[in-house]
Image: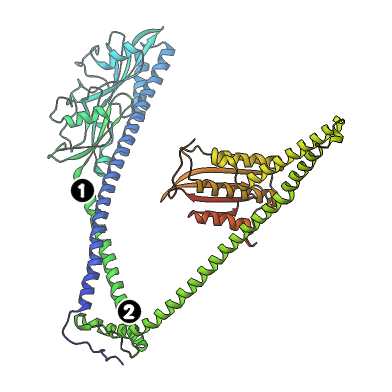
């Protein structure tokens, strides 16, 4: 019996320490790689989501501003249409009542005024000071409605009131008897068009520009004030974003204090541009929060994995010790070569003892392998017997052919000889009618004999196969079956660059011939499709033949007939295969695959 090594010696390497280091490396390294990938993905996701949120907020703010301006323009247009229809443009008392009502329902209008056709101010609400400008001929909100005859939202301008603040104006033309009679104007404080507080609370900065890229409104985080010209400033990045409208862009030192930001521009229907910016610090803070969450999750996952590994290692250690005990039970005494455990880790010494015992059992396993090889030789002999039976079948076919030649062709030739001999009888010299009748009989028998010989020749090997190739031989076979049966046969042969190897052509023709014969005899089909093509295989080109019919199908449980065995044998001789299966909707598909790499193609004639 092998020596008991349950108590390992002190010297030697510690396999447990090495395995523990390997496990830690196998766990920590993937976790570190996963952490890097997750942090990168989360960074890209946060940036993408921030850009998407920034663009969506800008579009929503631009649509809200459009709605705001259209609503106030519509209110002035309704009032102007009513006064135009009434024809009382000069009734100032009524204008004062109308302007007070508009100012009540639309408090965003800081000032409302009515002018005549010469741009003189007729009335205003609230009333203008006595020393205020009496003419607005130089204002865009007067000139544009007069020129276009339509309502207009002006660019930003400096007001002439006491505060001289930045304003925008909404104006509509007035008409009397179809003639321009003045404008109805409502002005607003430029810094109150878009609610900035809600955007700032969500970390956004706002910059509203008119058609000339003049600042209409700016939030506190931007180094801009209303009426500043953006194109003339030191930050061409904002002007580029406003002009191009080319999605979210990153701008350097664009905010107050030199902070970077993401910027996007959204167009307003009146030609303005609304720029929305998000400080880079907001995105970075969100990235830090996401990274902290990802790292915390990975720490939890790592802790869980290590706990599972420790538990599994303890369980595995117990299993291995039990396995070693079982392996020692199989050990047998013998003179077989033993393993030398001198250079093995001390934890593997019991395993070395067990393997030394199993070496003896390997000899018995070797004997079993020999028995298996003998069984394989027996199976090979059976295969050779099958091949011998196939040769016997070929000899039977040859005897049948010989019998056909002797009994049928031979008798026909004998009849021709006897009939020709009778013509030499002198008694028939004066009977031309009888001689003619004998000649006609000889010609008829000769025609039948030629036809029988042609059929036998086609059966043995069609001449078209050697002279014209596979396609011509298949078409001849299809034509023969079509004449002698009610089958509708469709043949499709893919164009071939050159003649195929003779062995492959013959095998393909015989398999197709046997398959078509089986369909005509047993399938009960009305339609057959024959397809031949060359496909690219892993080891070279393949000749693929498919014969499919719409008959009763193939019964896999029924023993294969001699024809099917012959088809498979022909394909196997060339290293190919034949599969036969029923297809959906009824019928059978015969598929033969023949490799062409082994053979040499003959040139096309």
Query: What x and y, as percent, mark residue 103?
Result: 33, 26
At horizontal 50% and vertical 56% (from top left) the residue drawn is: 573
Q: Position of residue 297 (x, y in %)?
A: 28, 61
- Which residue, as the protein is rendered here, is positioned at the far bottom? 1
Distance (Cα) linking label 2 and label 1: 46 Å
Residue at image coords 83%, 37% = 425
Q: Residue at x 48, y 40 (%)?
A: 499
Closer to the camera, 1 or 50? 1
Q: Nearer the viewer, mark 2 or mark 1?
A: 2
Which quadrant of the figure has residue 60? top left
Question: Regarding mark 1 in the picture, which secondary structure is present there?
Answer: helix
Residue bearing mark 2: 315
x then y, percent, for residue 382: 55, 68
**Looking at this view, is 268 or 510 the one in front?**
510
For residue 347, above or below residue 549: below
The structure's colour scheme is rainbow
């Amino acid at each position: 019996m092998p020596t008991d090594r349950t108590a390992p010696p002190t010297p030697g390497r510690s396999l447990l320490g090495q395995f523990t280091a390997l496990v830690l490396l196998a766990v920590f390294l993937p976790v570190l790689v996963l952490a890097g990938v997750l942090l990168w993905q989360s960074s890209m996701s946060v940036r993408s989501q921030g850009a998407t949120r920034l663009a969506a907020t800008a579009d929503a703010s631009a649509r809200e501003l459009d709605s705001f301006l259209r609503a106030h323009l519509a209110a002035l247009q309704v009032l102007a249409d009513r006064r135009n229809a009434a024809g009382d443009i000069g009734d100032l008392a009524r204008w004062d009542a109308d302007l007070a009502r508009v100012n009540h329902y639309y408090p965003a209008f800081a000032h409302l005024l009515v002018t005549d056709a010469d741009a003189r101010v007729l009335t205003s609400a609230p009333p203008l000071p006595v020393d205020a400008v009496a003419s607005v001929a130089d204002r865009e909100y007067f000139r544009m409605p007069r020129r276009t005859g339509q309502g207009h939202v002006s660019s930003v301008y400096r007001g002439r009131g006491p505060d001289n603040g930045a304003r925008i104006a909404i104006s509509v033309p007035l008409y009397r008897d179809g003639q321009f009679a003045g404008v109805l104007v409502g002005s607003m404080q430029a810094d109150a068009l878009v609610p900035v507080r809600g955007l700032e609370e969500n970390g956004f900065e706002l910059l509203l520009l008119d058609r000339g890229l003049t600042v209409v409104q700016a939030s506190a985080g931007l180094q801009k004030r209303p009426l500043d010209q953006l194109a003339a400033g030191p930050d061409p990045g904002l002007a580029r974003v406003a002009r191009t409208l080319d999605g979210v862009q990153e701008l350097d030192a664009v905010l107050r204090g030199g902070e970077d930001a993401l910027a996007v521009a959204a167009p307003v229907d009146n030609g303005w541009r609304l720029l929305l910016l998000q400080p880079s610090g907001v995105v970075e803070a969100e990235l830090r929060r996401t990274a902290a969450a990802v790292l915390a999750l990975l720490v939890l996952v790592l802790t869980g994995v290590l706990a599972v590994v420790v538990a599994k290692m303890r369980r595995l250690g117990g299993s291995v010790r039990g396995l070693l005990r079982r392996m020692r039970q199989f050990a047998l005494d013998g003179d077989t070569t033993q393993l030398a455990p001198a250079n093995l880790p001390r934890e593997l010494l019991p395993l070395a003892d067990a393997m030394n015992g199993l070496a003896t059992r390997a000899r018995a396993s070797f004997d079993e392998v020999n028995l298996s090889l003998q069984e394989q030789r027996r199976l090979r002999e059976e295969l050779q017997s099958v091949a011998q039976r196939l040769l016997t079948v070929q000899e039977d076919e040859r005897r049948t052919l010989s019998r056909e030649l002797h009994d049928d062709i031979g008798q026909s030739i004998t009849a021709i000889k006897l009939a020709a001999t009778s013509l030499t009888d002198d008694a028939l010299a004066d009977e031309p009618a009888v001689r003619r009748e004998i000649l006609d009989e000889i010609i008829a028998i000769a025609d039948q004999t030629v036809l029988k010989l042609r059929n036998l020749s086609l059966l043995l090997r069609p001449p078209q196969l050697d002279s014209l190739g596979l396609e011509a031989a298949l078409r001849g076979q299809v034509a023969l079956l079509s004449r002698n049966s009610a089958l509708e046969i469709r043949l499709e042969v893919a164009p071939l660059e050159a003649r195929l190897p003779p062995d492959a052509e013959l095998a393909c023709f015989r398999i197709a011939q046997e398959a078509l014969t089986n369909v005509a005899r047993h399938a009960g089909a009305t339609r057959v499709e024959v397809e031949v093509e060359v496909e690219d295989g892993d080891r070279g080109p393949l000749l693929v033949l498919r014969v499919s019919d719409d008959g009763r199908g193939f019964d896999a449980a029924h023993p294969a007939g001699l024809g099917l065995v012959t088809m498979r044998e022909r394909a196997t001789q060339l290293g190919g295969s034949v599969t036969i299966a029923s297809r959906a909707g009824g019928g059978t598909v015969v598929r033969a695959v023949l490799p062409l790499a082994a053979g040499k193609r003959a040139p096309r004639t």
